[in-house]
Amino acid sequence: MALSDVSRETFTNRLKHTPVRSGTYIVMPNTAKPAFLIPTHSKKIFKTAIDLIKPISRKGELKKRLIKMAPLWVLKLVFSTVKINTGKTEGRYAVVLPWNQDLTSKLTLIVFDQALRQVEVLKYAFTEATRQMVQNEKNYLERLQDDAESKIIVPEVKNWIENDAYCCLVQDFYFGSYVENLTSNLYTFFDKLNTSDIRCLNEHPYILNKMPVIAQRLKDFECTQLLDEISKLFEQYKRTRFQVATMHSDFSTTNTVHTSDDKFVIIDWEDAEDEGINIDIPFFKFRRQLYEKGWWEIRNAEGFLVVFHYIWFMVNKGNREMLQKFRIDRGVFSS
């Protein structure tokens, strides 16, 4: 793995708190930015684990099929591997998903048995910042309700573990595919999260809470040109009125699962907030276009806000490298 000796030891020690089995894991797509650690205890276990990963495109689906067909020894030559020793040799298996390619602060596990009778998602947080995120998700999952009319499911908290070393949130895993296009069900669900409180942007709690932090961090990260463009756009749209809303904050293709019985599961509520702004649906569209085309034209206040929120998202994650790539030129945002 692309880890220092200290990070490698931290990662290994933290895995010992989880149900991850000892063994060899394939790292995908690479060690520089690991997205998945896939168990290779047998070819069957490997294929079952791969089946639990949802591609976000047809290209990803094709890669998944090819990987399932290839012999393990070939895959171990093509991809990097890591040997994990947790001392556990029994129980269920797990796919390890590092948070933002960080193997030491937060780990999501998809835990399963060979027959897929019981599949769960376990979110482990080990640092103060990530513990707050997982605790925040727990709070929202306990507050929010399924919307039977709109066929929207909010995951249930199946278990919660908290001690000095970590906290862990346990949820069900949902089979299905990621949502590529919005449906009326999703519009209806987010409409119900709006409040009757409508304010101009220069008086909106969403902006007031985030603008000072964004300004300071962009200065710290030497992104002054980006800050100047954001400030100009804010001046242009500051009198536009928006509802205060409970906000998912990271609503995107990969956080929405369409199940086989035509229901929609909205997952990953870690960044949710009450004094948000009603742009979850436009943010979905923005993320989709950015993924496919790499740019977004800011045509109105809503178009500005989704860019503002994406910048906040990266600021909040401390992603200096990404922020320094952002550009706004003649009203077009690119990354």
Image (cartoon, rainbow, N blue to C red):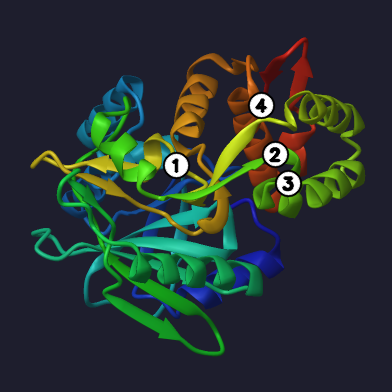
Decide which of 307, 191 is in the foreground and name it: 191
Q: Which residue is mark 3?
A: 203
Q: Which residue is mark 2?
A: 201
| Residue 142 appears left or right of 99 | left
Q: Which residue is mark 4?
A: 304
Disc 4 to disc 2, C-alpha distance: 11 Å
- Residue at left offset 33%, top offset 35%: 187
Q: Residues within 10 Å of mark 3 (few under 14, many from 20)?
A: few
Kind of residue sitting beneath label 4 = Phe
Q: Residues within 10 Å of mark 4 (few under 14, many from 20)?
A: many
- Whichever of callouts 4 and 2 sits on the residue coming sooner in the sequence is 2
Kind of residue sitting beneath label 2 = Leu
Q: Can residue 70 be seen here?
A: no
- Whichever of callouts 3 and 4 sits on the residue coming sooner in the sequence is 3
Nearer the camera: disc 4 or disc 2: 2
Q: Can residue 176 be seen here?
A: yes
* SS at mark 1 in the image: loop
Q: Position of residue 110 (x, y in %)?
A: 31, 59
Proximity of marks 2 and 3: CB atoms separated by less than 8 Å: yes
| Residue 107 appears left or right of 170 | right
Decide which of 246, 97 is in the foreground and name it: 246
Nearer the camera: disc 1 or disc 4: 4
